[in-house]
């Protein structure tokens, strides 16, 4: 259920992924939400001091440039930006001193340092005990493992990447809950820091700032930020689902509750939405995670390999002088017969940047098969492997959570990949609804709009706005051999919703 103010509103969404970022203007009016991209910029890891880092200073400069473009675009239309929301990837952080200076450029989760600390952490905190409290999927780059490699943490505070951006904008230190839940130091039931783990690991209790919920105000712009961007100093920065997957799931255009979702991008986040975490040992052994969503929901999911595999192949082929057109590659891959070799898309061997086609072929050889050195064959292997992983993960999520689903929503960049969507429908035996591509930014904007009173109601109301605003595509199982992959358009619904 939802309602809407007749005044509408304009909101700035800072939406940054592991390979690119953008600043978008979101407009909520007339029962619909729309997006306008005002600034795009690349993002990626850099080698620095023997490790893989994010160039945060350059990243923040791009944010300021984007906000200035947003202010200029809005002013040209006689509009005023009501607030700013920030979402990024999870787990990574920067360390700031009492004066607010960044000690070093933040490490990237793709660096190997977390792996070296896993055994030491588990000597202090048994994995079963960790899971029973945090409900967090084991990944070698989870924040608590990264923190265990830090030489000294006294006198500094850790700010997760979206919180670090908000701090640079406002001077206020907070930790937004959806991202806090990915650290391995957050109590999945209490919704607060698991302070006993801080003590056990020798971390000071104020290492992270206090937790804030999506929709709460972080602060207003610092004078120098207002001057640089052209935004009024009283412009607020509002906490949204700062983990990009939390914002994306908030914008899943589901009509019914029995849905599963796949947030498909660099990574694939595959799962269901629950009211309470699943903390049993069987869930831990299956390596499922319980992360916070908007409105206190639980994103019960598993990280699965994603389109990083495909983008890294494209990067390798381009570096070798064989730039591949993605649309043509997908058409050629779709023409290949079913039943080809597959890989384990979750293998840690695929995490770091390197020659991805060679690593994929090596993984196939290790499984006793051979993958020809043809781009279309490699692409089909990737997509078949992802679809199979999605199906296995969703089936296990239903079994462990007790929640049965009838439809799978694919949002994010992968929703544009028609072959992947059709293969997922075939592998799961469920209808797949694809879109919106910009789910993360839509979720970001709608949480801001609700905080401003432009819309009211719960997640069902926000999702109804998405359905009224975007074109979706539907894929039925068993149509992979039909062009174009068996999909059919689903028109935006009427904005008149109870």
Image (cartoon, helix red, strand yellow):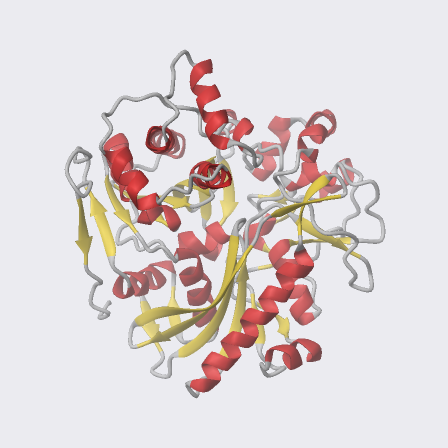
In the image, taking residue 474 as reference, residue 130 lies left or right, namely right
Answer left or right for 174 relative to 429: right
Tell me the quarter of the picture where residue 109 sits.
top right
Residue 140: quarter of image: top right
Q: Residue at x 50, y 75 (%)?
A: 70
Q: Position of residue 430 (x, y in %)?
A: 23, 37
> Can residue 282 be seen here?
no
Residue drawn at x 16%, y 36% is: 479
Identify the image quadrant of the N terminus: bottom left
**Residue at the (42%, 78%) spot, across then down:** 9
Where is residue 339 shown, x and y percent of the image? Answer: 27, 21
Identify the residue at the far top of this view.
Answer: 368
The furthest residue to the left: 482
Residue 341 location (% of width, % of height): 35, 21
Marks counted in the figure total: 0
Residue at the bottom extreme, as displayed: 78
Which of 216/468 is in front? Answer: 468
Compared to 454, does 345 lie above or below? above
Specify the quadrant that holds the C terminus. bottom left
In the rendered image, residue 166, in percent from the top left (x then y), is placed at 63, 65
- Between 96 and 178, the one nearer to me in the picture: 96
């Amino acid at each position: 259920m939802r309602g809407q103010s007749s005044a509408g509103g304009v909101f700035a969404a800072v939406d940054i992924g592991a390979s690119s970022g953008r600043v978008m203007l979101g407009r909520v009016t007339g029962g619909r939400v729309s997006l306008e991209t005002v600034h795009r910029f690349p993002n990626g890891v850099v080698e620095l001091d023997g490790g893989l880092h994010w160039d945060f200073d350059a990243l923040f400069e791009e944010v300021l440039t984007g906000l200035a473009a947003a202010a200029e675009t809005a002013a040209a239309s006689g509009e005023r930006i009501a607030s700013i929301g920030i979402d990024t990837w999870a787990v990574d952080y920067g360390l700031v001193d009492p004066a607010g200076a960044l000690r070093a450029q933040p490490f990237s989760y793709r660096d190997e340092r977390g792996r070296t600390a896993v055994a030491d952490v588990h000597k202090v905190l048994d994995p079963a005990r960790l899971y029973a409290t945090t409900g967090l999927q084991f990944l070698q780059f989870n924040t608590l493992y990264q923190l265990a490699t830090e030489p000294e943490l006294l006198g500094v505070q850790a700010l997760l990447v979206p919180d670090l951006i908000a701090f640079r904008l406002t001077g206020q230190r907070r930790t937004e809950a959806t991202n806090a839940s990915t650290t391995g130091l957050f109590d999945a039931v209490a919704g607060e820091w698991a302070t006993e783990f801080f003590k056990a690991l020798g971390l000071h209790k104020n290492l992270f700032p206090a937790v804030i919920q999506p929709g709460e105000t972080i602060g207003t712009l610092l004078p120098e930020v207002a001057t640089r961007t052209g935004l009024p100093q009283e412009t607020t920065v509002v906490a949204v689902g700062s983990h990009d997957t939390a914002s994306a799931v908030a914008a899943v255009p589901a009509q019914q509750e029995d849905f599963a979702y796949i947030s498909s991008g660099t990574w694939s986040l595959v799962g269901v939405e629950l009211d309470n975490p699943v903390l049993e040992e069987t869930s831990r052994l299956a390596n499922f995670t319980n992360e916070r969503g908007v409105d206190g929901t639980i994103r019960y999911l598993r990280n699965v390999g994603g389109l990083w595999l495909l983008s890294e192949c494209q990067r390798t082929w381009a570096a070798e002088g064989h730039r591949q057109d993605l649309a043509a590659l997908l058409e050629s891959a779709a023409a290949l017969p079913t039943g080809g070799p597959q890989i384990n898309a979750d293998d840690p061997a695929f995490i770091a940047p390197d020659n991805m086609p060679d690593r994929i072929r090596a993984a196939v050889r290790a499984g006793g098969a051979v993958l020809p050195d043809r781009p279309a064959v490699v692409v089909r292997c990737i997509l078949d492997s992802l679809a199979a992983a999605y199906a296995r993960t969703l089936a296990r999520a239903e079994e462990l959570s007790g929640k049965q689903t009838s439809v799978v929503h694919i949002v994010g960049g992968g929703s544009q990949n028609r072959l992947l969507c059709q293969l997922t429908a075939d592998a799961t035996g469920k209808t797949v609804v694809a879109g919106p591509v910009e789910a993360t930014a839509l979720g970001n904007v709608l949480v801001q709009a609700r905080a401003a009173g432009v819309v009211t109601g719960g997640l069902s109301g926000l999702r109804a706005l998405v359905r009224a605003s975007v074109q979706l595509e539907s894929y039925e199982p068993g149509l992979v051999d039909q062009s174009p992959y068996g999909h059919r358009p689903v028109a935006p619904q009427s904005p008149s919703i109870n």
